[in-house]
Amino acid sequence: MFQEDNIIALATASGIGAIAVIRISGPNAIEMVSSKFQAIGKKSLEAQKSHTVHLGHIVENDTVIDQVLVSLFKGPNSYTGENVAEISCHGSPYIQQKLIQLFLKNGCRMATPGEFTLRAFLNGKMDLSQAEAVADLIASDSEASHQIAIQQMRGGFSNEIQHLREELLNFASLIELELDFSQEDVEFADRSQFNELLTRIVNVLERLIDSFALGNVIKNGIPVAIVGEPNVGKSTLLNALLNEERAIVSAIAGTTRDTVEDQIAIGGITFRFIDTAGIRDTQDHVEKIGIERAYEKIEQAALVFYLIDAMSDRQQEIKNLQEKYPDKKILVIANKTDGATESQLNFLKANHTNLSLISAKFGDGIDDLKDTLLQLTNTGELGKNDTIISNSRHYDALLKALEAIQKVKEALAEGLASDLMAIDIREALFHLGEITGSVTTDDLLGNIFSNFCIGK
């Protein structure tokens, strides 16, 4: 880690804009900017207080490059924990590159992806799970994914893990102490209290692990497969949900031969709708491939819309699909209600409990369908402000920590020796420490921060 370097990067998106922000961090960041900055009031940047903004010009060899605002953040009270200067300039790509090249020639180097946040982690400004939440927050594209990221960045998840780890560490110390007095056959750790702690840790870990199913789909978008026989209106439904002509609609059966996907946010949740080829027996080779892909999308989907014609009954087909995918949430949607008789609609209502009635062509029932969709995704944990896991690295570490804790519980129940329990306790502590960064390796940090954008 080259923390003595002064690093620079464009902190705003590249391209033309009203303004751009160039960030410099390092021990000499403020001094370097000061040497190229002429303040309107002729003041020296180095003599100014932290968290102040100053108007002036960046000058190279008596040539003004741009009029800018320079924001000062003196370490350790900055994002990175180091001296930081942020230059707000006009958003011309030429000006951006001219300023960056000026400071590269005068002691800076280009920041690597995520290096500002990496320095924040190394300087104790945030733990590792909070640092990862920064990337998730930048990538959030819905209210729900934003809510998960902001809660994690504020330390809700890491505080919970850190508290459990500290409690476990206290008991681990007593267990390790017993090893030093193994010949005296003494117990420093109260076994009943230890068992209560282990039970509590198991409950917390299982709750967090279970939340990953929701967190992962919220982060990546909840996939919804629209399936059914040809000509029941699957493509029309996709267009109605998206409110645009995304898929080709035709009266000719088998028009859709591949999957068509797009996404929208409903109630703050991102949904990925997948229009599939109509499911039927066919001799057409290309259509068969499309039908195979339809079944693949059903496997991958969190929710399945099974579309039927409201003027027909498909009880057996629906039953077959439910038997083939017993663990899938399947919503039966009767389309083309505008052409159905009242008796046909009453028959459908009487024979299907999980049913939505719509006319995709005219938009009838689409809003109600969206409300039903939100109810079926079971996002109640968001409203309760519970901790939700959306990071696969955290999920993997929690699984391994849970496995180790369960081994400790089993050893405790069987009255096994302290040295055997100590091995699994250390294993649990290691995996919990991986989450917050109490335990790290260069490879782990390199893998995490390489996925960040440059400038953050």
Image (tube, rainbow, N blue to C red):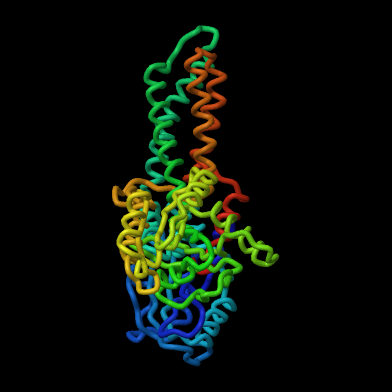
Tell me the residue at 42%/67% (across/down): 264
**As drawn, is 102 to the left or to the right of 218?**
right
In the picture, which quadrant includes the N terminus? bottom right
* One can see residue 354 in this view: yes
Residue 148's place in the image compared with 111, above or below, is above
Considering depth in this image, is 411 or 184 the residue closer to the camera?
Answer: 411
Residue 49's place in the image compared with 202, above or below, is below
**As drawn, is 256 to the left or to the right of 328?**
right
User: How far from the left and from the top, in percent, is residue 446?
Assistant: 60, 55
Residue 246's place in the image compared with 433, above or below, is below
User: How far from the left and from the top, in percent, is residue 224?
Assistant: 47, 59
Tell me the residue at 39%/26% (across/down): 197
Residue extending furthest top? Answer: 184
Tell me the residue at 51%/7% (across/down): 184
User: How far from the left and from the top, in percent, is residue 85?
Assistant: 43, 71
Considering depth in this image, is 431 or 369 the residue closer to the camera?
Answer: 369
Tell me the residue at 36%/47% (across/down): 156
**As drawn, is 397 to the left or to the right of 56?**
right
Considering depth in this image, is 137 or 221 the residue closer to the camera?
Answer: 221
